[in-house]
Amino acid sequence: MTESISLNLNKIKSSLPKNVTLVAVSKTKPIADIQVAYDAGHRVFGENKVQELQEKAPNLPNDIEWHMIGHMQSNKVKYIAPYISLIHGVESLKLIKEINKQAMKNNRVISVLLQFYIAQETTKFGLHYEEAIEILESEDFKSLENIKISGVMGMASFVSNNEQLKQEFASLKTIFNRLKTTYFNHSSDFNIISMGMSGDYPIAVQEGSNMVRIGSSIFGARN
C-alpha cells in the first residue's frame, strides 16, 4: 500500500503540466498514509472536515500546506484560522467576513477561492456570477484587509459526458477571466483556477485548470 501511494503520486505528478498544483485529497485517510505521501516529497494536502484537519495537522510535519476543500461553515473557521493555507469553497459574504475576522485575530491574511456553481446538479454549492459581483462591489467586502481572493473553484457534474465536462470547466475559466479583467487586473495573487478531481482532471487541465484535487487516484478508494 505504502509503495502504491508513492507510485500513484509520482505518476500523476509526472502527467501534470509544471504550472498545475496537485492537492492530494487526504480526507478519511489515516495519518500514516499522508506521511507516506509526504515522504515521497508531496507537501499540499486537502481536507474537507475541520475536525479531521484538527486531528491530523498537529501530528504531521508543520511545513505541510493544508487546504480546506469542503463546504465551510462560518462557526468552524476559528479552529483552522491559525494555520490554514487556502480555503477553497467560499460562497458567501458572511463566510468571507468571518474568515477575515479570524485571520485578524491570528494576525495573518488568509487566502480563499470563490466557489462557483458550474454543474447541472442541485447537490453542488457555489455562487452565480452576479452574486460574486455583488460581494466584490459591496462596501463590506472592500473594507476587509485580512482576506485575499486568490482565484476561483468549481466542481463539474458527476457525469461521463466529456463534452458536458468541457463546457462546465470552460465556463469557470471564463468567469476567472472576467473577474481578473474587471476586479483583479493588478493583483498577481488572483491566479488560481481550481477544478478537476480524480475522475475528470485531465479535461479540467485542458480547459485551463492550474490546481487539481485528487484523492482516490493517489490513496485508493475511500472507506
Image (cartoon, rainbow, N blue to C red):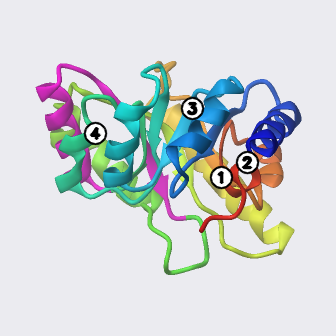
Report the amino acid beneath label 3.
Val
- Label 2 with label 1: CB-CB less than 8 Å: yes
Mark number displayed over residue 27: none
Q: Distance between the residues labelled 4 and 3?
A: 16 Å
- Label 3 with label 1: CB-CB less than 8 Å: no
Q: Is residue 149 visible?
A: no
- Stretch of the chain drawn in magenta: 92-117
* Secondary structure of residue under mark 1: loop
Q: Distance between the residues labelled 2 and 1?
A: 5 Å
Mark 1, residue position: 215
Quick one: label 2, few (<14), some, or many (20+) residues within 10 Å? many
Q: Can residue 16 be seen in this view?
A: yes
Task: Indicate the position of residue 52 as horizontal and vertical percent values.
Answer: 38, 52
Q: How far apart are marks 3 and 1 (CA)?
A: 12 Å
Disc with the residue nearer the chain's start (3 vs 1): 3
Q: In this view, does 102 lie above or below 64?
A: below
Mark 3, residue position: 44
